[in-house]
Image (spheres, coloured by chain):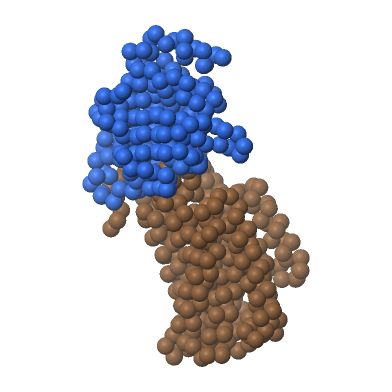
Amino acid sequence: MTPFPDLLRVNNLSARYGRMDVLRSVNLSIGEGEFVAVLGPNGAGKTTLLRALMRLNEGSGEILFRGRDLTRLSTHGRAALGMIMVQEDRGLFRDMTVHENLTVGAHACRDRSETQSRRERVFAIFPRLHERGGQIAHSLSGGEQQMLAIGRALMAGPKLLMLDEPSLGLAPRMAAEILARLGELNRAGLSILLVEQKAPLALQLASRAYVLAVGRVVAELNADQFGSHHETLARYYFA
Amino acid sequence: MRRSPDTTSPSAACAPVRRQQLAFTACAGAALLAFLFFGKSYALTVVAFAAIYGIFVTGLNFFMGYAGQVSFGQNAFAAIGGYGTAILCTRYGWDPALALLASMALSVAAAAAVGYPTLRLRGHYLAMATFALGLITYEISVHWDSLTQGYMGIPSIPPMGIAGLSLSGERQQLAALLAILAFGIFISARLRQSRFGRALAAVAGSEDAAHALGIAVFRYKLAAFLISAAYGSAAGSLYAHLVGFISPEAFGLQMILWSFTMIFLGGVGTLWGPIIGAVLVALLSEAFRGFKELQDLAYCAVLILILIFAPKGLVVSLTALFQRRRGA
């Protein structure tokens, strides 16, 4: 269905909190170099989906990354393969400076010149981070914190960058600005999985979208269908 | 040598701070040296105990400060160190340095046995397990008579020494203690600035985020725990040598209360905070000596006040105050 070879394939992924099912047999795939959005209202299971992919929550089902079965692989093992997530709360190391946060992002990279060139790339994408280099993370503005969270993820050398509502709590202009950077990263070849509640923002960038509602994938749309499926989207958002 | 180029720009801004630290270290070193030669015997003893506790809390700081975890059972490692040294030196005539290293190895093994299964779990499992370890070690020291001589304790432990060379004078002993403490602080400082130290700080900051960035959280927590056990054990061994006598009471729950007071009073997670805390508590304990049993009450009160009014400890609070003054 996609013109891209599979990077990530998820088969029958389920997850639960206690006795409550949060994800029910989710199937999805992301192609190499693709930008895929996962849309859905609050409580649809979007965050749980990302956390289960990273094994920060336990899930059952099959996850294949570049053809490799991840079932038994730890969170850091998945990160080492290039699955890097930007958490919903950004998960910054609050008491560290911008520089230190970025350095920790490249923890798994032992090659110093590679680390340095990643850092330069991050600064090229977010010049603001360069200006704020010595500042403590928790003293940054919301938008800058989000830039730092994404920058830190880029330091980890992602093959697949997964973001959990990066626009959350940001002024519309800042949100648009940050999403535009994601678009640039994708055009430069990075595969991106973007979880968003604000569908219009995500649909401008994505080539495909899954709609998640109460833990199930209820629709899968291609970019050319986005316009004609306003009703589908609206039904799940406002039901 | 491992410093990456990225740290150069922020470090330019804190050069005066580093110079201050250097000056502070030099002054403290000179004062200690003078004290070593001219100090009164009683004062020497107080400082010797402060140094031993300094080693103990520098170790604890790896786990509670740098890695942001909690251990209520650090007294177990001091007990293993103390009893290991006492038994090996008095009963088997081992060289003190060798006994110290052997006890450290045993402590690290015990820490691994407790830490390996519990550190994988989130939350309070490790804290509870360490608490149990502390209690178990205490019970063993009381009830395993044939090994530990129970409440009677083990007397006539020789002073510390190495390769047949014994440090009998109290000035020599104190000098050795201070050298070991300095070595311990040096290791702590180096590791804190390293890749290892940054990973620990990341684990302390956000376990999920660290894990998702590819840091093997469990391995780092375990490493910090093992290091803290090694320090704790060394402190126990040195205590046994200094006093020459140990009994179960020496490594009881009181030790946890004392070390927590020190570490939080000075500043958890800072390099010098725990040391400053150790010195302050050693001095306080002399001041409070008249209160006897009420002493512990006083420490609890200090601990609670610190946690409420200066949770980051005196070092951080005073530095902040100082910088604000200078800025104004």
Q: Which chain is blue?
A: A
Residue A116: name its quadrant: top left
Residue at 33% x, 25% y: name it. A35
Residue at 50% x, 42% y: name it. A58
Q: Which chain is brown?
A: B
Q: Camera-side residue: B292 or B105?
A: B105
Is A41 rendered above or below residue B90? above
Residue B76's spot in the image, x, y percent?
59, 70
Residue B131's spot in the image, x, y percent?
63, 62
Residue at 39% x, 44% y: name it. A70
Left or right of B250? Residue B122 is left
Q: Camera-side residue: A77 or B213?
A: A77
Is A169 rendered above or below residue B192? above
- Quadrant location of the N terminus of chain A in the rendered image: top left
Q: Is residue A216 visible?
A: yes
Q: Camera-side residue: A206 or B297?
A: A206
Q: Is residue A99 visible?
A: no
Residue B30: name its quadrant: bottom left
Left or right of A3? Residue B180 is right
Is B102 rendered above or below residue A24? below
